[in-house]
Amino acid sequence: MTTPHRRDPDRLLPADPRTRAVARALYERVAGAPIVSPHGHVPIEWLAEDRPFADAAGLLVSNDHYVTRLLHASGVDLADLGVGGASADPREAWRIFASNWHIFAGTASGYWIEDELAGVLGVSDPPSAAHADSLFDQIGEKLATPEFRPRALFERFGIEVLATTDDPLEDLAKHDVVAGSGLRGRVLPTFRPDRYLDPAAPMFASDVRRLLDLTGEPATFSGYLSALESRREHFIRHGAVSADHGVEDPATFDIDDAEAELLFQASLAGTADASQQRVFRGHMLLQMARMSVEDGLVMTVHAGVVRNHSSHTHRQFGADTGHDIPRRTDFVGGLRPLLERFGLEKQFHLVLFAVDETVYSREIAPLAGFYPSVFIGAPWWFLDAPDAMARFRSAVTETAGFSRGSGFIDDTRAFLSIPARHDTSRRADASFLARLVVEGRLTENVAGAIIDDIVGPQPKRVFKL
């Protein structure tokens, strides 16, 4: 074996000794704080069934599109990695990953995997072609023990709150199982209605029919709204605190009920053109805001991603397999109709997430710096990396301060990466605050109070926890 790799305890902290000392003290205040994760994609089945994870490839490679997309870019067939349910030998998939470990140098995903291997699995040797099999077996032996089953890891990670993302028609029985399991910490469902709101979605008409059938509502626009409201109530009864919306374009439209009825019927019939679909989709985003004002669910909007950019890959492997690509985003113009109606509602919480870095200082921070309803979502997807986190803080703080943020959101289905991602954010925030202290822009006491707030109280306030 190679010489064991020891993780630097000051990793990600500033190189300047004086600033690093301040950052280290700030980080140590919150390093062991409980994890509050109010938006993520860990399957509820993992915690409800509490089955052992099968192997290293399934846990760290096949289901992590941060990993598989870069391997694919390097010429690896996604089928050989077991992506999208493809039949693949897990050991061979792991060998492919280990042989290509060098391509993750300098990436956030490589950093997280090193943290997972060393901090969670106790594996000090980095992946390599020479040691792929021994690492696969070593990890497999650990995963077979009770200490590495999902619920045990959940408690070991110190998770206080974890939100899943769920289809509106789910009965949420598995959430009931987890709630009654004695697990320390809360696991909450999140209402994710995108497929029921977008007439361009492949199964929109049949999905809406299922929604109406389940709720007993008529196939009218008012019946459709009542059906969605009913399912939101069901989620709230099961502990949900937020509704999440993933949109390419955050455009909203405020139209009257007669026009909405016409567009709804055209969408059900499949005769709505692209312009009509856009107006209906944007009006439904506004209706979701109206419902959040009425029922209290926090509204989160993840905007600016072209989903399933590769049609061929989508046909073969399905959604969420690594080919979602960012695009330019207009929040100011797009959300104005929504904010004209609901932006001044103080009980309405709207959290905006972007993958277009240009909008942080130009649009999102100014919006959050005026509207009491708007909060700045943490760096997400392509921006949830150390340098991008630093750019994010620089972009929003001078306009909106620290109080208008969401707190860190890991937004992951890679379960073992949760503590690594939160630790990354804590180190990045400690580094940013330390610079402000050394530059005489904050006192250490104020910086300490800010970082204490960011890791727990802030996300609890924003997500009404």
Image (cartoon, rainbow, N blue to C red):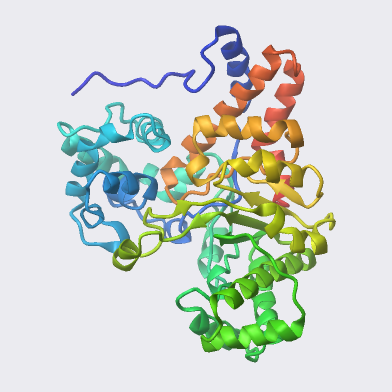
Tell me what residue is drawn at x 71 percent, y 61 percent.
297
Q: Position of residue 308 (x, y in %)?
A: 41, 61
Q: Position of residue 355 (x, y in %)?
A: 54, 47
Q: Nearer the viewer, residue 117 or 260?
A: 260
Tell me what residue is drawn at x 44 percent, y 47 percent.
415
Q: In the rendered view, does 428 fall on the left or right side of 6?
A: right
* Residue 32 is at least partly visible in this image: no
Q: Position of residue 236 (x, y in %)?
A: 68, 66
Q: Nearer the viewer, residue 371 or 272?
A: 272
Q: Nearer the viewer, residue 280 or 185?
A: 280
* Residue 382 is at least partly visible in this image: yes
Q: Quadrant of the N terminus?
A: top left
Q: In the rendered view, does 381 fall on the left or right side of 238?
A: left
Q: Nearer the viewer, residue 419 or 357?
A: 357
Q: Tell me the quarter of the picture where residue 391 sits.
A: top right
The relative height of residue 449 versus residue 229 in the rendered view (above or below) is above
Q: Position of residue 253 (x, y in %)?
A: 71, 69
Outermost residue to the left: 130
Tell me what residue is drawn at x 51 percent, y 13 percent.
15
Q: In the rendered view, does 70 fall on the left or right side of 28?
A: left
The relative height of residue 350 versus residue 261 in the rendered view (above or below) is above
Tell me what residue is drawn at x 55 percent, y 54 percent.
304
**Tag count in the figure?**
0
Q: In the rendered view, does 95 fall on the left or right side of 209?
A: left
